[in-house]
Amino acid sequence: MQAPITPANEVQRLQALQALKLLDTAAEPRFDRLTRLVQQCLDCPIVLISLIDEQRQWFKSRQGLEACETPRDMSFCGHAILTDQLFEISDARLDPRFADNPLVTAAPFIRFYAGAPLTINQQRIGTLCLIAPEPRQLTPQQRQNLRDFADAVEQEIIDRLQEQAEQELKASRDQYQALVNNIPGITYRCQADPNWTMLYISGSIDPLSGYPASDFIQNKLRSYASVIYPPDRERLEQAVAQAIAQRQSWTLQYRVQHRDGSLRWVEERGQAEYDDTGQVRYLDGFILDINAEKQLKQQLLNLTAHLPGVVYQYQQWPDGRAAFPYASAALKRIYGVTPEQVKTDATPVFAAIHEEDLAGLASSIEHSRQQLLEWRHEYRVKDLNGKVAWMAGNATPEAMPDGSVLWHGYIQDITASKQSFLALQQANQQLQLARERLDTASELALIGFWQASLKTGELWWSPAIFQIFGFDEANTTPSVALFKSTLHPDDRQKVALSEQQALISGIHDVSHRIIRPDGSIRWVHERARIVTDADNPERIMVGSVQDITERVQLQQLKDEFIATVSHELRTPLTVIKGALSLVNSGQLGVLPAASQKLLVAAQQNSERLAHLINDLLDMEKLVAGKMPFLRQPLQVQAQLAQAVHELEPFAAQYQVQLEVTPVESGLQLWADSLRLQQTLANLLSNAIKFSKPNSRVQLRAQLLADHIRIEVEDNGLGIPEAFQARIFERFAQADTEQRRQKGGTGLGLAICKALIEQMGGEIGFQSAAGQGTLFYFTLPAVNADK
């Protein structure tokens, strides 16, 4: 949590606040009336007039919140008064300043906040703020409305200071009147009687009903109920009566009949005001003309009703929730559920997806979400009778302020065309034997393909084969003789035997080595077919060539590595661990304290080595991002001390001293402790092994902006410049006598790189020949407030 900073003019600001004599005073209708109006107009559950004194924020007026004050150091308003601009947080849980704020993690569970500073005598004394427990974002018009309301609050504060009550009341009413007349809607106050006798209604009623506001005041010529469309009146009255009985606000949509006979859709948001005895005094509310919105929605419904597929909106949140906020009626024809059934939960739609297509569908949606690219996919759905239909969908994703993604799309039934396609595909498969030469060349074009006459020796290569064999296409004429000249001497007989077998079976399939003109050796995989002599008098063979050098090398390295782990590390390590455990258990007698300390450290390191071996065997899982990580706040000093403690016996063997530079007190980072210690052990052990006897290896850490940088530095021979570009590759080792003597699998630094990057950090090094090496990595820092 980030506490708000203290403004430079804090003394003057507090003096201006105290001069207003507002703090710790009773509630006043002038302010409560405005906050209720803001609550209705901007449709926000919590509205506050917050005053910031030295230690707290105190609420002069509050709607939707029981508490009358909170500490200043956890207040949002404390941040809002630092600037003249409106301060808005769309989702507090995504903002590092507030994510762990108690007002966010506990009641009132703030997610959305918008505060307009209140400025009196050039000092920002507090805010008029909006709070909601779900993410949202104000429109430009709503921001302007909030600023206008804040201006009205400022005016009320100024008016309050005036000596005469009548002047104060008149100014307040004039300000209120000017404000509500500029709001794009109708504000009203009426009595809670059967006729809803109007005490006040704004002039915006004129264009909506065709009658002037004066007609409705005190129901002089007509009541507001008289312009409500009769079929909607009973529903409206019942809903308002129920809301009053439950002491709740109401939001209702209904129709108003204009003087010219036309109907207009409106949305009313209102609530009752109660006296000290709990009796209803007034009904206050806000009425908004939504006729244009209703007409557009009806036009959309009419349009989508004639489409053969489903027009829809699909929304997915970071926590995995999904829903269809809008779907046309055709949804039921395709998925067997109504749009209302999936408006808040998309599960019924996914239940209709064919089980074999669910994973692919989910993967395509996730790819679209991550890349914000257009979604296109084909899949099957099943009805209750098991009948299968093919669907094709496409949609455009849109990132929303709350972190969700909203797709706008269309789904249609393509069963007929898909069946035709599948039938055509089956027919093509039946024709495959008759088109073998053409199909083989087409399928293998991306690898490299060739055609040879075993009778004449003529040979044709695609461009890719020239690259594989290292020949210049412009100056080389392929021939069987040229090909045979590239064969590695040890593999010539293997290739010849495969060609002879092809004359019998029709299949040529062999992997072998070639020697390129520059002397480099590459592994290739050849696969070809030859038809019978009766149909192929020229003895034509068509085939492909693929360069598999890296695959062969990786497989060799993998086999060697697994053999090393299984036979040279795991078995002796098990014996060592067992022996150390037996000695440390005391069953063989009590050891001297110095020996016992060394043996305990040895046992700890053998356990760590066992963990390391398991991690090495899971290297593919680590690279794929599937290794589990338990990230948590860790004390940097403690982590460095633990690493040094566990490596001291190893350092002593090399006559190397480990030195830790003191770290700033309280410094913390986000990491998995086991993976952090594994990284430190790798870097420290490397530094120790390549250091000179009687030298030092230094371990230090420092805070840089929002991350911690940890460094391991030795004064050894350094890393050869030619090897530096490959230092973090798997199985990479510099070809020097010293490194051959030190041993190792060449995986340590690759593991370090993968671990650090998956914990959100970076790793690198600095090295100069004869001057030692400095390895460093960064990890996210933990905020001091956290």
Image (spheres, helix red, strand yellow):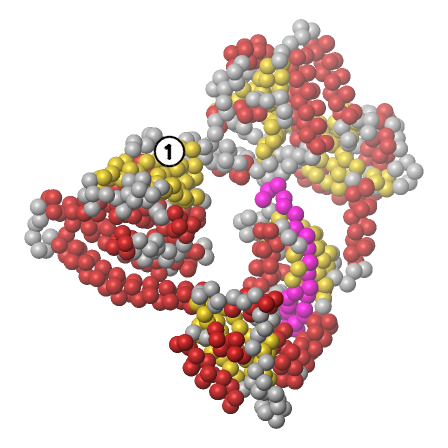
Q: Which residue is mark 1?
A: 702
Image quadrant holding the C terminus, namely: top left
Instruction: Identify the residue at image location x=67%, y=6%.
Output: 163
Q: Amino acid at mark 1?
A: Gln
Q: Is 255 displayed left or right of 535 in the figure?
A: right
Span colored in magenta: 378-403
Give left or right: position of 548 versus 180. Answer: left
Query: Could you tell me which residue is drawn at 63 percent across and 84 percent down?
Result: 433
Q: Is residue 35 above or below residue 707?
A: above
User: Relative to 275, is 762 above or below?
Assistant: below
Q: Residue furthest front?
A: 475
Q: Callout 1 environment at 10 Å: few (<14), some (14 to 19), or many (20+)?
A: some
Callout count = 1
Q: Position of residue 633 (x, y in %)?
A: 38, 40
Q: Secondary structure at mark 1?
A: strand
Return the residue nearer the eye: 245 or 561: 561
- Find out whether residue 103 is within the magenta segment: no
Residue 679 spot, x, y in % from top left = 34, 47
Quarter of the figure with residue 139: top right
Q: Along the line of sight, which residue is nearer the eye, 687 or 265?
A: 687
